[in-house]
Image: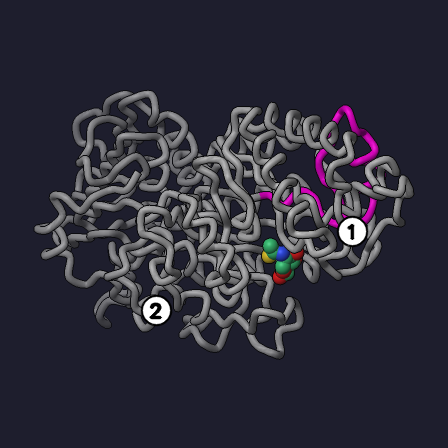
Amino acid sequence: MRAGAVGLVSLLALGAGLGACAASTAGPETTTPMPVPLSAIIPAPVAAHPDPAADFTLDRSSVITVSGGAADPTAQWLATLLRRGTGFPLPIVSSARQGERVIALVAGPADPSIGDEGYMLSVTPSEVVIRASSGAGLFHGAETLRQLLPARIEDPGSPGPWVVSGGQILDYPRYPWRGAMLDVARHFFSVADVERYIDEIALYKINVLHLHLSDDQGWRIAISAWPQLATIGGSTEVGGGLGGYYTGEQYQEIVAYAASRYITVVPEIDTPGHVNAALASYPELNCDGIAPAPYTGTDVGFSSLCVGKPITTQFLDDVIGELAALTPGAYIDIGGDEATTIPAPDYASFVEQVTQIVVKQGKTPVGWAEIGAATLPPGTVVEGWDTGHDASVQEAAAQGARVVLAPADHAYLDQKYDPETALGLTWAGPVSVEASYAWDPAQYGVPAGQVEGVEATLFSETLTTMSDLEFMAFPRLPGIAEIGWSPPSSHSWDAYRERLAAQAPRWEALGIGFYRSPEIPWPAG
Ligand code: TNX
């Protein structure tokens, strides 16, 4: 699914100001702030055509109309957000009465260039129309409208006026996979925390939540045939805290919450390495039949499943089978990184076995770059991490795998911003805000048609609370989201840092404790 640029030429020509800076205040004769320019949103839109004579003002008598069933969930979501912020009733109706100002969500035929995730947004004095061919497109359009409203829309019962800049946006993603990986294994995060993170990444049109559900320090998903994985494997975390795990129902709640934001959960069970929590839970999974002690440190690369032992196959069948049954999305991630304790041929045969188990369950395998050393089923998605230029990414690409790029020196949100950052690791960093934005997935030697997208990873060895996650993700995550969504022609650090600065009041209103990096010209306040 790659959307073309058909029909965009005139809009692009008129869309001067793309990447322009954020709202400024009007002249001294008035205190009414200028509305957010159409081109100020993150990710930058494909094309924006401002019409200063066509601003729209949301008022107490405004209504939301829906047309096409796919519009209903987004209408509900948008109504909740706007009612809370404005205090207006904003009923959802099938058609507006004469003179009512309207936000119209229209699911149906749209410009073919927008593909299945794009949207068109048109703002005139009487209506805001968001049109898309899918629910996902409408949702992305609604997130755009949210950014076009003043940041105080995030605060309950705020005063107006609620002015949206006039004009048109036509917008669609560069890549189909715009991911955020969250490590709930090194430290456990509650369902509420994960749902909050889902809302935060949805703001920037991320559409994949890769959940790192198991590692040496913790196993975080209950598996009915292997209950001790959760009760023993889930009972620890880095630093010796209590850990935790999701029941199947809780995991499904996360998956459903993500789906309501058009985000697909990709669950990862890391194998054959990164398995101390599983080995500690069941002695029989170990080659010598002896369970190791739970692990609460931060080393990597010391544990492995016992390749070739029949019970290992049983374990994989049961775990992947149950996870597949709980997961409506197309993907199961089998990890595959840093398996340094087993010989290369054993590693390759293991990866071939485990990816076939995923295929047998009707899912598409995903794994870290190292799995490129094995023969992979068609369609496999490989995630390039390290620097992204490593040989295994090329090996995977050469066999036709689709590649998601998460180069650690740009996309690892667990790395310190600078040497002074209190949280975070250092092995690939520091990763400044500028570094997180200064890369292009097209420059990693992977054939263009095989670059599936990007991912911002958040490993949690040093992160214990939701505020820690937010401090590391913001302000870097929006840059990676923009690299995954926006056309390369809009890429400009100077313009981007102005747009990023303008996000700060919204994060403050949402209670997101972001890092006030000195690289960004934050507004005073
Ligand atoms: C490398 S990224 C790892 C993880 C660590 C991470 C810390 C990858 C595939 N493996 O096990 O948590 O570095 O940055």
Image location of residue 496, percent across then percent down: 34, 66
Question: Type of residue at label 2?
Answer: Glu
Was residue 232 drawn as part of the magenta stretch in this picture?
Answer: yes
Label 1 crowd (10 A; few <14 / some 14-19 / many >=20):
many
Horizontally, is 411 left or right of 440 in the view? right
In the image, which disc is placed on residue 463? none
Give the dominant element type of the magenta stretch: helix, strand or loop. loop
Residue at 62 percent across and 78 percent down: it is: 420
Image location of residue 6, percent across then percent down: 14, 43
Viewer-side residue, 177 vs 103: 177
Residue at 31 percent across and 23 percent down: it is: 93
Horizontally, is 316 left or right of 334 in the view? right
Q: Which residue is the site of mark 1?
A: 237
Question: Type of residue at label 1?
Answer: Glu
Residue at 64 percent across and 32 percent down: it is: 251
Horizontally, is 397 left or right of 32 in the view? right
Image location of residue 60, percent across then percent down: 32, 37
Image location of residue 306, percent across then percent down: 77, 41
Residue at 37 percent across and 59 percent down: it is: 445
Magenta stretch bounds: 211-237
Question: In the structure shown, which secondary structural element does the residue marked by tag 1 occupy?
Answer: loop
Was residue 345 drawn as part of the magenta stretch in this picture?
Answer: no
Horizontally, is 264 left or right of 185 in the view? left
Q: Residue furthest right?
A: 290
Q: Earlier in the sequence, mark 2 or mark 1?
A: 1
